[in-house]
Image (tube, grey):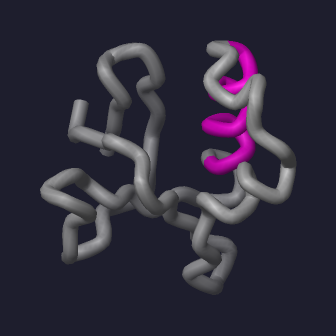
């Protein structure tokens, strides 16, 4: 399954959480997919002004090597 943020960042995810965040999707990522998202965010310059602690706090560990992001505007692609 693919998800996107404004068509600027599109990536694969393994699924979606059953509950949405303010109406937006909450994708579930593997560790490898999480690392890809982080690299793309750096490439796009979206986190230039954020500290590493702020960046890390956006990720939620779901266990079993799966992660989701909180507060990002994801849609299915």
State the image coordinates of residue 54 (x, y, percent, origin top left): 74, 54
Q: Is residue 54 above or below residue 60?
A: above
Q: Residue furthest right?
A: 52
Residue 17, quarter of the rendered image? bottom left
State the image coordinates of residue 74 (x, y, percent, origin top left): 32, 42
Residue appearing at x 42%, y 26% in the figure: 10
State the image coordinates of residue 23 (x, y, percent, origin top left): 14, 56
Q: Residue furthest bottom?
A: 63
Q: Residue furthest front?
A: 49
Q: Is residue 1 above or below residue 26?
A: above
Would residue 38 be counted in the magenta stretch? yes
Q: Is residue 11 above or below residue 23?
A: above
- The N terminus - image quarter: top left
What span is in magenta?
A: 34-43
Apparent side of residue 29 relative to residue 4 in the rendered image (left or right)? right
Would residue 9 be counted in the magenta stretch? no
- The C terminus - image quarter: top left
Apparent side of residue 18 relative to residue 45 in the rendered image (left or right)? left
Residue appearing at x 64%, y 83% in the figure: 64
State the image coordinates of residue 29 (x, y, percent, origin top left): 53, 57
Residue 45, quarter of the rendered image? top right
Residue appearing at x 76%, y 24% in the figure: 48
Give the dominant element type of the magenta stretch: helix, strand or loop: helix
Mark count: 0
Q: Residue furthest left?
A: 23
Nearest the eye: 4 or 55: 55
Q: Is residue 76 above or below residue 47?
A: below
Residue appearing at x 68%, y 36% in the figure: 36
Apparent side of residue 73 relative to residue 13 in the rendered image (left or right)? left
């Amino acid at each position: 399954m693919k998800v996107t943020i404004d068509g600027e960042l599109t990536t694969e995810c393994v699924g979606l959480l059953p509950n949405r965040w303010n109406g937006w999707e909450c994708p579930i990522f593997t560790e490898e997919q999480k690392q890809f998202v982080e690299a793309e965010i750096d490439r796009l310059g979206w986190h230039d002004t954020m500290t590493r602690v702020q960046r890390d706090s956006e990720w939620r560990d779901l266990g079993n090597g799966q992660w989701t992001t909180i507060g990002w505007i994801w849609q299915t692609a």
